[in-house]
Image: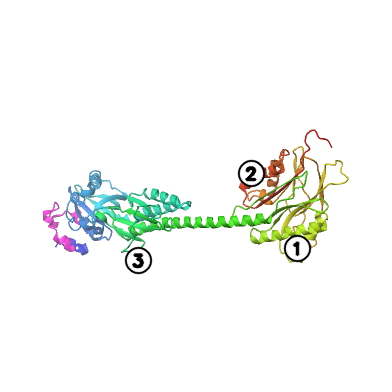
Amino acid sequence: MDQLFEAAGTLRSAYRSVDWAATPLGAPSGWSPMLRAAVDVALHTRFPVTLFWGPEFVMIYNEAYVELIGDKHPASLGAPAAHVFREIWDVIGPMLESVRSTQRATWTQDMRLLMDRRGYPEECFFTFSYSAVRGPDGVEGVIDIATETTGRVLSQRRLIMLAGLSDALSGLDDPAEILDQAAAMLRTDPQDLPEVDILVTDPATDAGTPPLPAVRSTISCNGDFVLESPADIPVMRVRLPGLTPSAETVLVARLSQHLPVDDGYVGFVRLVGATVAQALQRAQTRQAERRVAGLERDLSERLQRSLLTPPAQPDHLEVAVRYQPAAEQARIGGDWYDSFPQPDGGLTLVVGDVAGHDQQAAAAMAQIRNLLRGVAYALQKPPAAMLESLEATMRGLGMDALATAVLGRLEQAAQQARADARTLVWSNAGHLPPVLITPDGTATLLHTPPEMLLGVQPGAVRSDHRVTLTPGCAVVLYTDGLIDRRDEIIDEGLADLTRSLTGRHGLTAEQLCDHLLDRYAATTDDDIALLVLRIPPKPAGLTR
């Protein structure tokens, strides 16, 4: 054997088997110095290199190149490239001819070729460069320096699909919608998944439809998939969580006939199934959580409302109340309203808020509300004294709670200029100011100097404040859930509240409550308690 081929390594026997004299190149002893030098370079590098020599582009390559052409070796050694690469010659033939005619090198990155190197047209990707090898009389051949990038390209393509699938399913909560979206998304990847479907059968609802065959596996130890090859077409089935306890849900994918069904391919399809399965499990968990949350919310709201009795409705007065629980489940809290008569004929009004949003806050609210009723009914004192006595009682009974409250008492004063006027006396324990709507439609905040919350400072001195209410006046008491928003300062909310009530003097107490909830309830995540007191205007034509 020619000493030139000693560097061929494991290919030495293949080189020895070629009848070089019968090839267009002739016997190696007659090869041109340029060809011998190029072969010497190719055989001494570990990078995949092949030479396409002469007009027929006869192939000479090194040991590293064999892996790129698979079963084409060893027959391709010394053979014309057009015979070796019949299936892709329409792509690479013009490129080789161009290099020979123009002497300009090519550069191709991640080129996709369907190459028959294992008995079927396999999807392959290569990055390579064809460069002219020039001798004294012009171009003698073309050298191909190449690397296969199939593994990287397929991995990247599959990762992109998995990421897109995960994103597409992440915001969905309906299992049926998840399956529809998953199938639609997977059908955008015909190279890895030429055909894909998600089959659901439920013997409980699909009369006459046989269930899917059990997914058995001879590959996976946990039996979550099976790989079949009917009519030499690889089909993979991956079990998914059923939409109902009796349902069978299976991802069925026909695999590409241009790719080897190796661990990477099988792993990709399993990851697709796992991504869909996780989305289904997440949706089913969310549905279960919503069902539980709905039950908890319903129970919580019933509990809260059971603690808030209907308000007293004295003659010639309108008293309307509303309670709306927080948007989040089970967030009953400490918001309350109350309206009850006193032995002397006065009417006590209160809106308050115990700190917290849980059952403990609701329990503390119920205790404070009942204590306040008892204190107010027994003492029959002005509101400030009632709040002082309430705080002392709370502390004496060991109640560790913080609360804000506006406590008012409506009286018919003996010294009023108008017999139909009323006096509202109130005290504010760290609560938001009430809103007064006068008969001309003006809405103003009943600001008072700030005083301490209940439960903060023992013996805190509290103040009474007074305002005269004539027919047509209304007073709105509310908790902070009505106007307090995370993206606004409280003064903006108070200003908006007064604007929303300006000109609403023609509304009844019930209509005022509805107006406020319509305007604010949809944008809050907190409880709302409302109490509106209104002195109806006298019917037209009546005098004092």
Label 3 or label 2, whichever comes before in sequence order:
3
Label 1 or label 2, whichever comes before in sequence order:
1
The x, y position of residue 257, in whole percent, is 27, 53
- Determine whether the residue tagged by mark 1 lies in a helix, strand or loop: helix
Q: Amino acid at mark 2?
A: Asp
Q: Is residue 451 magenta?
A: no
- Determine whether the residue tagged by mark 2 lies in a helix, strand or loop: helix
Residue count near mark 1 (Cα–Cα under 10 Å), binned few <14, some 14–19, many ≥20: some
Give the residue drawn at x 17%, y 56%.
Answer: 75
Q: Which residue is mark 1?
A: 394
Label 1 or label 3, whichever comes before in sequence order:
3
* Disc ID at residue 221: 3
Give the spatial CA distance, label 1 vs label 2.
36 Å
Quarter of the image that includes the N terminus:
bottom left
Counting labels gives 3
- Determine whether the residue tagged by mark 3 lies in a helix, strand or loop: loop
Give the residue drawn at x 14%, y 51%.
Answer: 24
Residue 168 located left or right of residue 321: left
* Disc ID at residue 518: 2
Residue count near mark 2 (Cα–Cα under 10 Å), binned few <14, some 14–19, many ≥20: few
The x, y position of residue 439, in whole percent, is 77, 38
